[in-house]
Amino acid sequence: MAPNITSSPTGVLFEGENIEDQPVEINKEKEIYKRRIVWRNVAIFSGLHIGAIYGVYLALTSAKLLTTLFAFILYQCSGIGITAGAHRLWAHRSYKAKWQLRLILIIFNTIAFQDLCAHNLCAPAVIPKPEHMPSWAYDLKSVSKDMVKTRVLKSGDGTHDVWGWGDKDQTLEEKQQTIHNFDFIKVVKTMSAKDIRNVFLKLESKKISLPEIIIELQKLSEEEAE
């Protein structure tokens, strides 16, 4: 069977057949590259680096040497826990690790999540389990009684929101705007990692579509919140 060649002007080139040379147009003009500056990113990264420089200044002038050293060690440990643990080991399965290393990476990874209740000065017993993320504290159905009690004891009455929003210096519109800026919270109230994993397994096996995932997650979150 003759080869199906459509790019050649004569189709198949047989023995003794000649093809006349054809001029080839070469574009000698260089494409002008236009540099575009994203000023939003410039402002964000500038603020990030300015904050880093100020942090170094405070570390050298205000903090004790042991505090600075301890913070640096925690920073390195949390970075290893995120990159080598959560990212490479558990997300991409790039390598296998013995239980000793897995335990160390688990401990390192938890360091990155130690500020869950830092803004509200919560007791350690009130901190939720990591699997009940995201937005566990932004819907009152999923907030434990101990959390509400902690906020009441701090403010003196039960009229304030759990996280301090809605204080006397904040209007109702400001409070609602603050809460609803978290777009994901409009969909999911509380959710376990097991439920999320099961739903995405259905997506992988093509048993459910992507829009149906949101509906099912919302339904499961309503059941969890009750």
Image: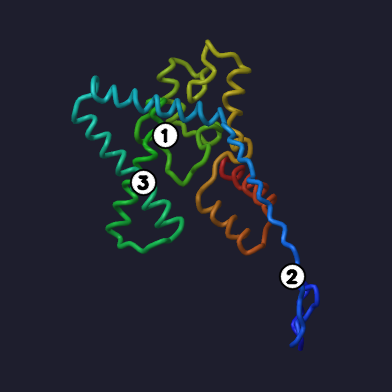
Front-most of 15 and 130?
15
Residue 21's disc number: 2
Query: How was the colour assigned to the protein in this rendering?
Result: rainbow
Earlier residue among tags 1 and 2: 2
Residue 215, position in %: x, y? Answer: 68, 47
Q: Which residue is mark 3?
A: 109
Q: Residue 116 — which label?
A: 1
- How packed is label 3: few (under 14 Cα within 10 Å), some, or many (20 or more)? many
The amino acid pointed to by label 2 is Asp
Q: Amino acid at mark 1?
A: Leu
Q: Residue at x 27, y 58 (%)?
A: 100
The local secondary structure at tag 3 comes to helix
Horizontal side of residue 126 vs 200, given as left or right:
left
Q: Position of residue 208 (x, y in %)?
A: 67, 58
Going by the numbered disc 3, the residue's amino acid type is Asn
Above or below for 211 versus 138: below
